[in-house]
Amino acid sequence: MNDDELSTMVRESVTDVHSATPIAQIISRGRAVRARRRTPALAGAGAVLAGTALAVTTLVPSGHPGNPLANARLAAWTVAKQANGDIDVTINQLRNPVGLQRKLRADGLPVRVSYSSHPLPVTRVGSYRGRPAFFVGPMGVGPAYHGPLRQDGQAPQLPCKFYPASTDVLNAVVTFPGGSTSPHGATVYLVIKPSALPAGAGLAMFVGGSIDDISEPNSEPPGTAGSVGQTSFTSKDGVPVPEYSVTVSPVYASQQCTG
Amino acid sequence: MGVGTQQLDFAEFYRSASDECLRAVLVSVGDQDTARELVDEAFARAWASWRTVSRHPAPKAWVVRTALNVNISRWRRRRREVHVPDPGRVADLHAVSRTSASLVDPQIMAALMRLPARQRQVVALRLILDLDTARTAEILGIAPGTVMAHLGRAMTALRHDLQPELQQENQR
């Protein structure tokens, strides 16, 4: 069987499959998508404009200096603590994780923020696009995240330990109002409710790496508690491409991990 | 372009491309119901961004890429709730037969599902959408040489998997 015959066989195997969805239904759904996109897009554009005006790499609270409740609006991210204690976090760019971690801790959240190395147990070392890499897969069967190995060929040593919180608890602590896919394009928006954290628990927040390759099998690390997250997409020549993911997992609060 | 004209334009695109996109996504995800949901959502998003998509050099590829991205997002959402295998990793012939009813050849679909996800995506774009290597590479964000390597490996694996089936059929 040559390549042409095989190609034909593959094509013909699905020729009886036809789309049956009426176009009116598609257009109706498209209108809903457009309407949903319009409001956050305006808000997102406002945030980006505000961020551009304050394009700084250090923490610059917009309220009173020294007040931990003051909101921080940066080009890279925005943190706003609400009167009820909830913390709104908007991430626009993969920059300044130390500042974000400092601000969140100042707002009373035991948290570890990592952009370049994963705070969770590494499940596998292998290669990604031809380069040595580590993979982690907090809850699924595929490597959700990956990153480069250290120069000595080892995966980063990570100081956090999973906290075995249920999914319900985790969903009470962290919500992504836009769902698992960012409606803001490259901006990710999440709301954290510190008061819902179980005693002794904190959060590990990982920002980075797209998840465009989930095909490789992976084993779940022991003690996995789960994670929630959102993927942002950018447009490359009009094609939406996963840009980065923000994932939050519960961990035991400790000086080493969450400060 | 007025809204009415845009809608006609989109309707024509949907009519001409929806079957092909559905088949490409089906080859990639392996389940008809999932593929239909993903493609419907992708076309809805295409309509929501029709000004951009209509100018795209390969709008069908845009739809398929979007559908696959939606699938990734769903996979993320599911994995925080219950343990489910990546649907693309499921190569159980009975499961494939059950979900795909009689519209697709179960042996070929099972063989496709045994391929790694990236190889299935390349097969979907190259063989079902009939995109060239360069466009496929662009859509998947990989090098053209990688596309060719994936396709070569996929064809070898499919041939190895399907040859016994063919021989059996020929002997009958």
Image: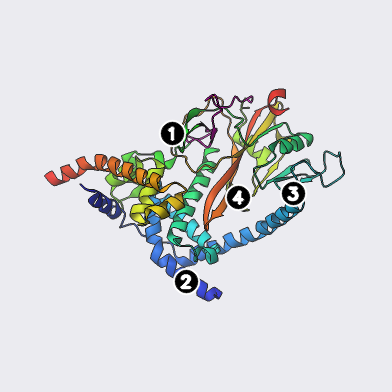
> Could you tell me how far apart the alpha carbons at marks 3 and 2 are, in whole angstroms?
42 Å
The numbered mark at residue A55 is 3
Mark 4 crowdedness (10 Å alpha carbons): few <14, some 14-19, many ≥20: many
Residue at x 30% of width, y 51% of height: B104
Report whether A2 appears left or right of B12. left
Span colored in magenta: A135-160
Q: In which quadrant is the C terminus of chain A drawn?
A: top right
Q: Which chain carries label 2?
A: B
The numbered mark at residue A253 is none
> Could you tell me how far apart the alpha carbons at marks 4 and 1 are, in whole angstroms?
26 Å
Q: Give the number of the mark in front: 3 or 1.
A: 3
Per the image, the residue denoted by label 4 is A182
Q: In which quarter of the image is residue A163?
A: top right
Label located before the other in sequence (4 or 1): 4
Q: Is mark 4 on a helix, strand or loop?
A: loop
Q: What residue type is labelled 3?
A: Ala
Per the image, the residue denoted by label 2 is B9
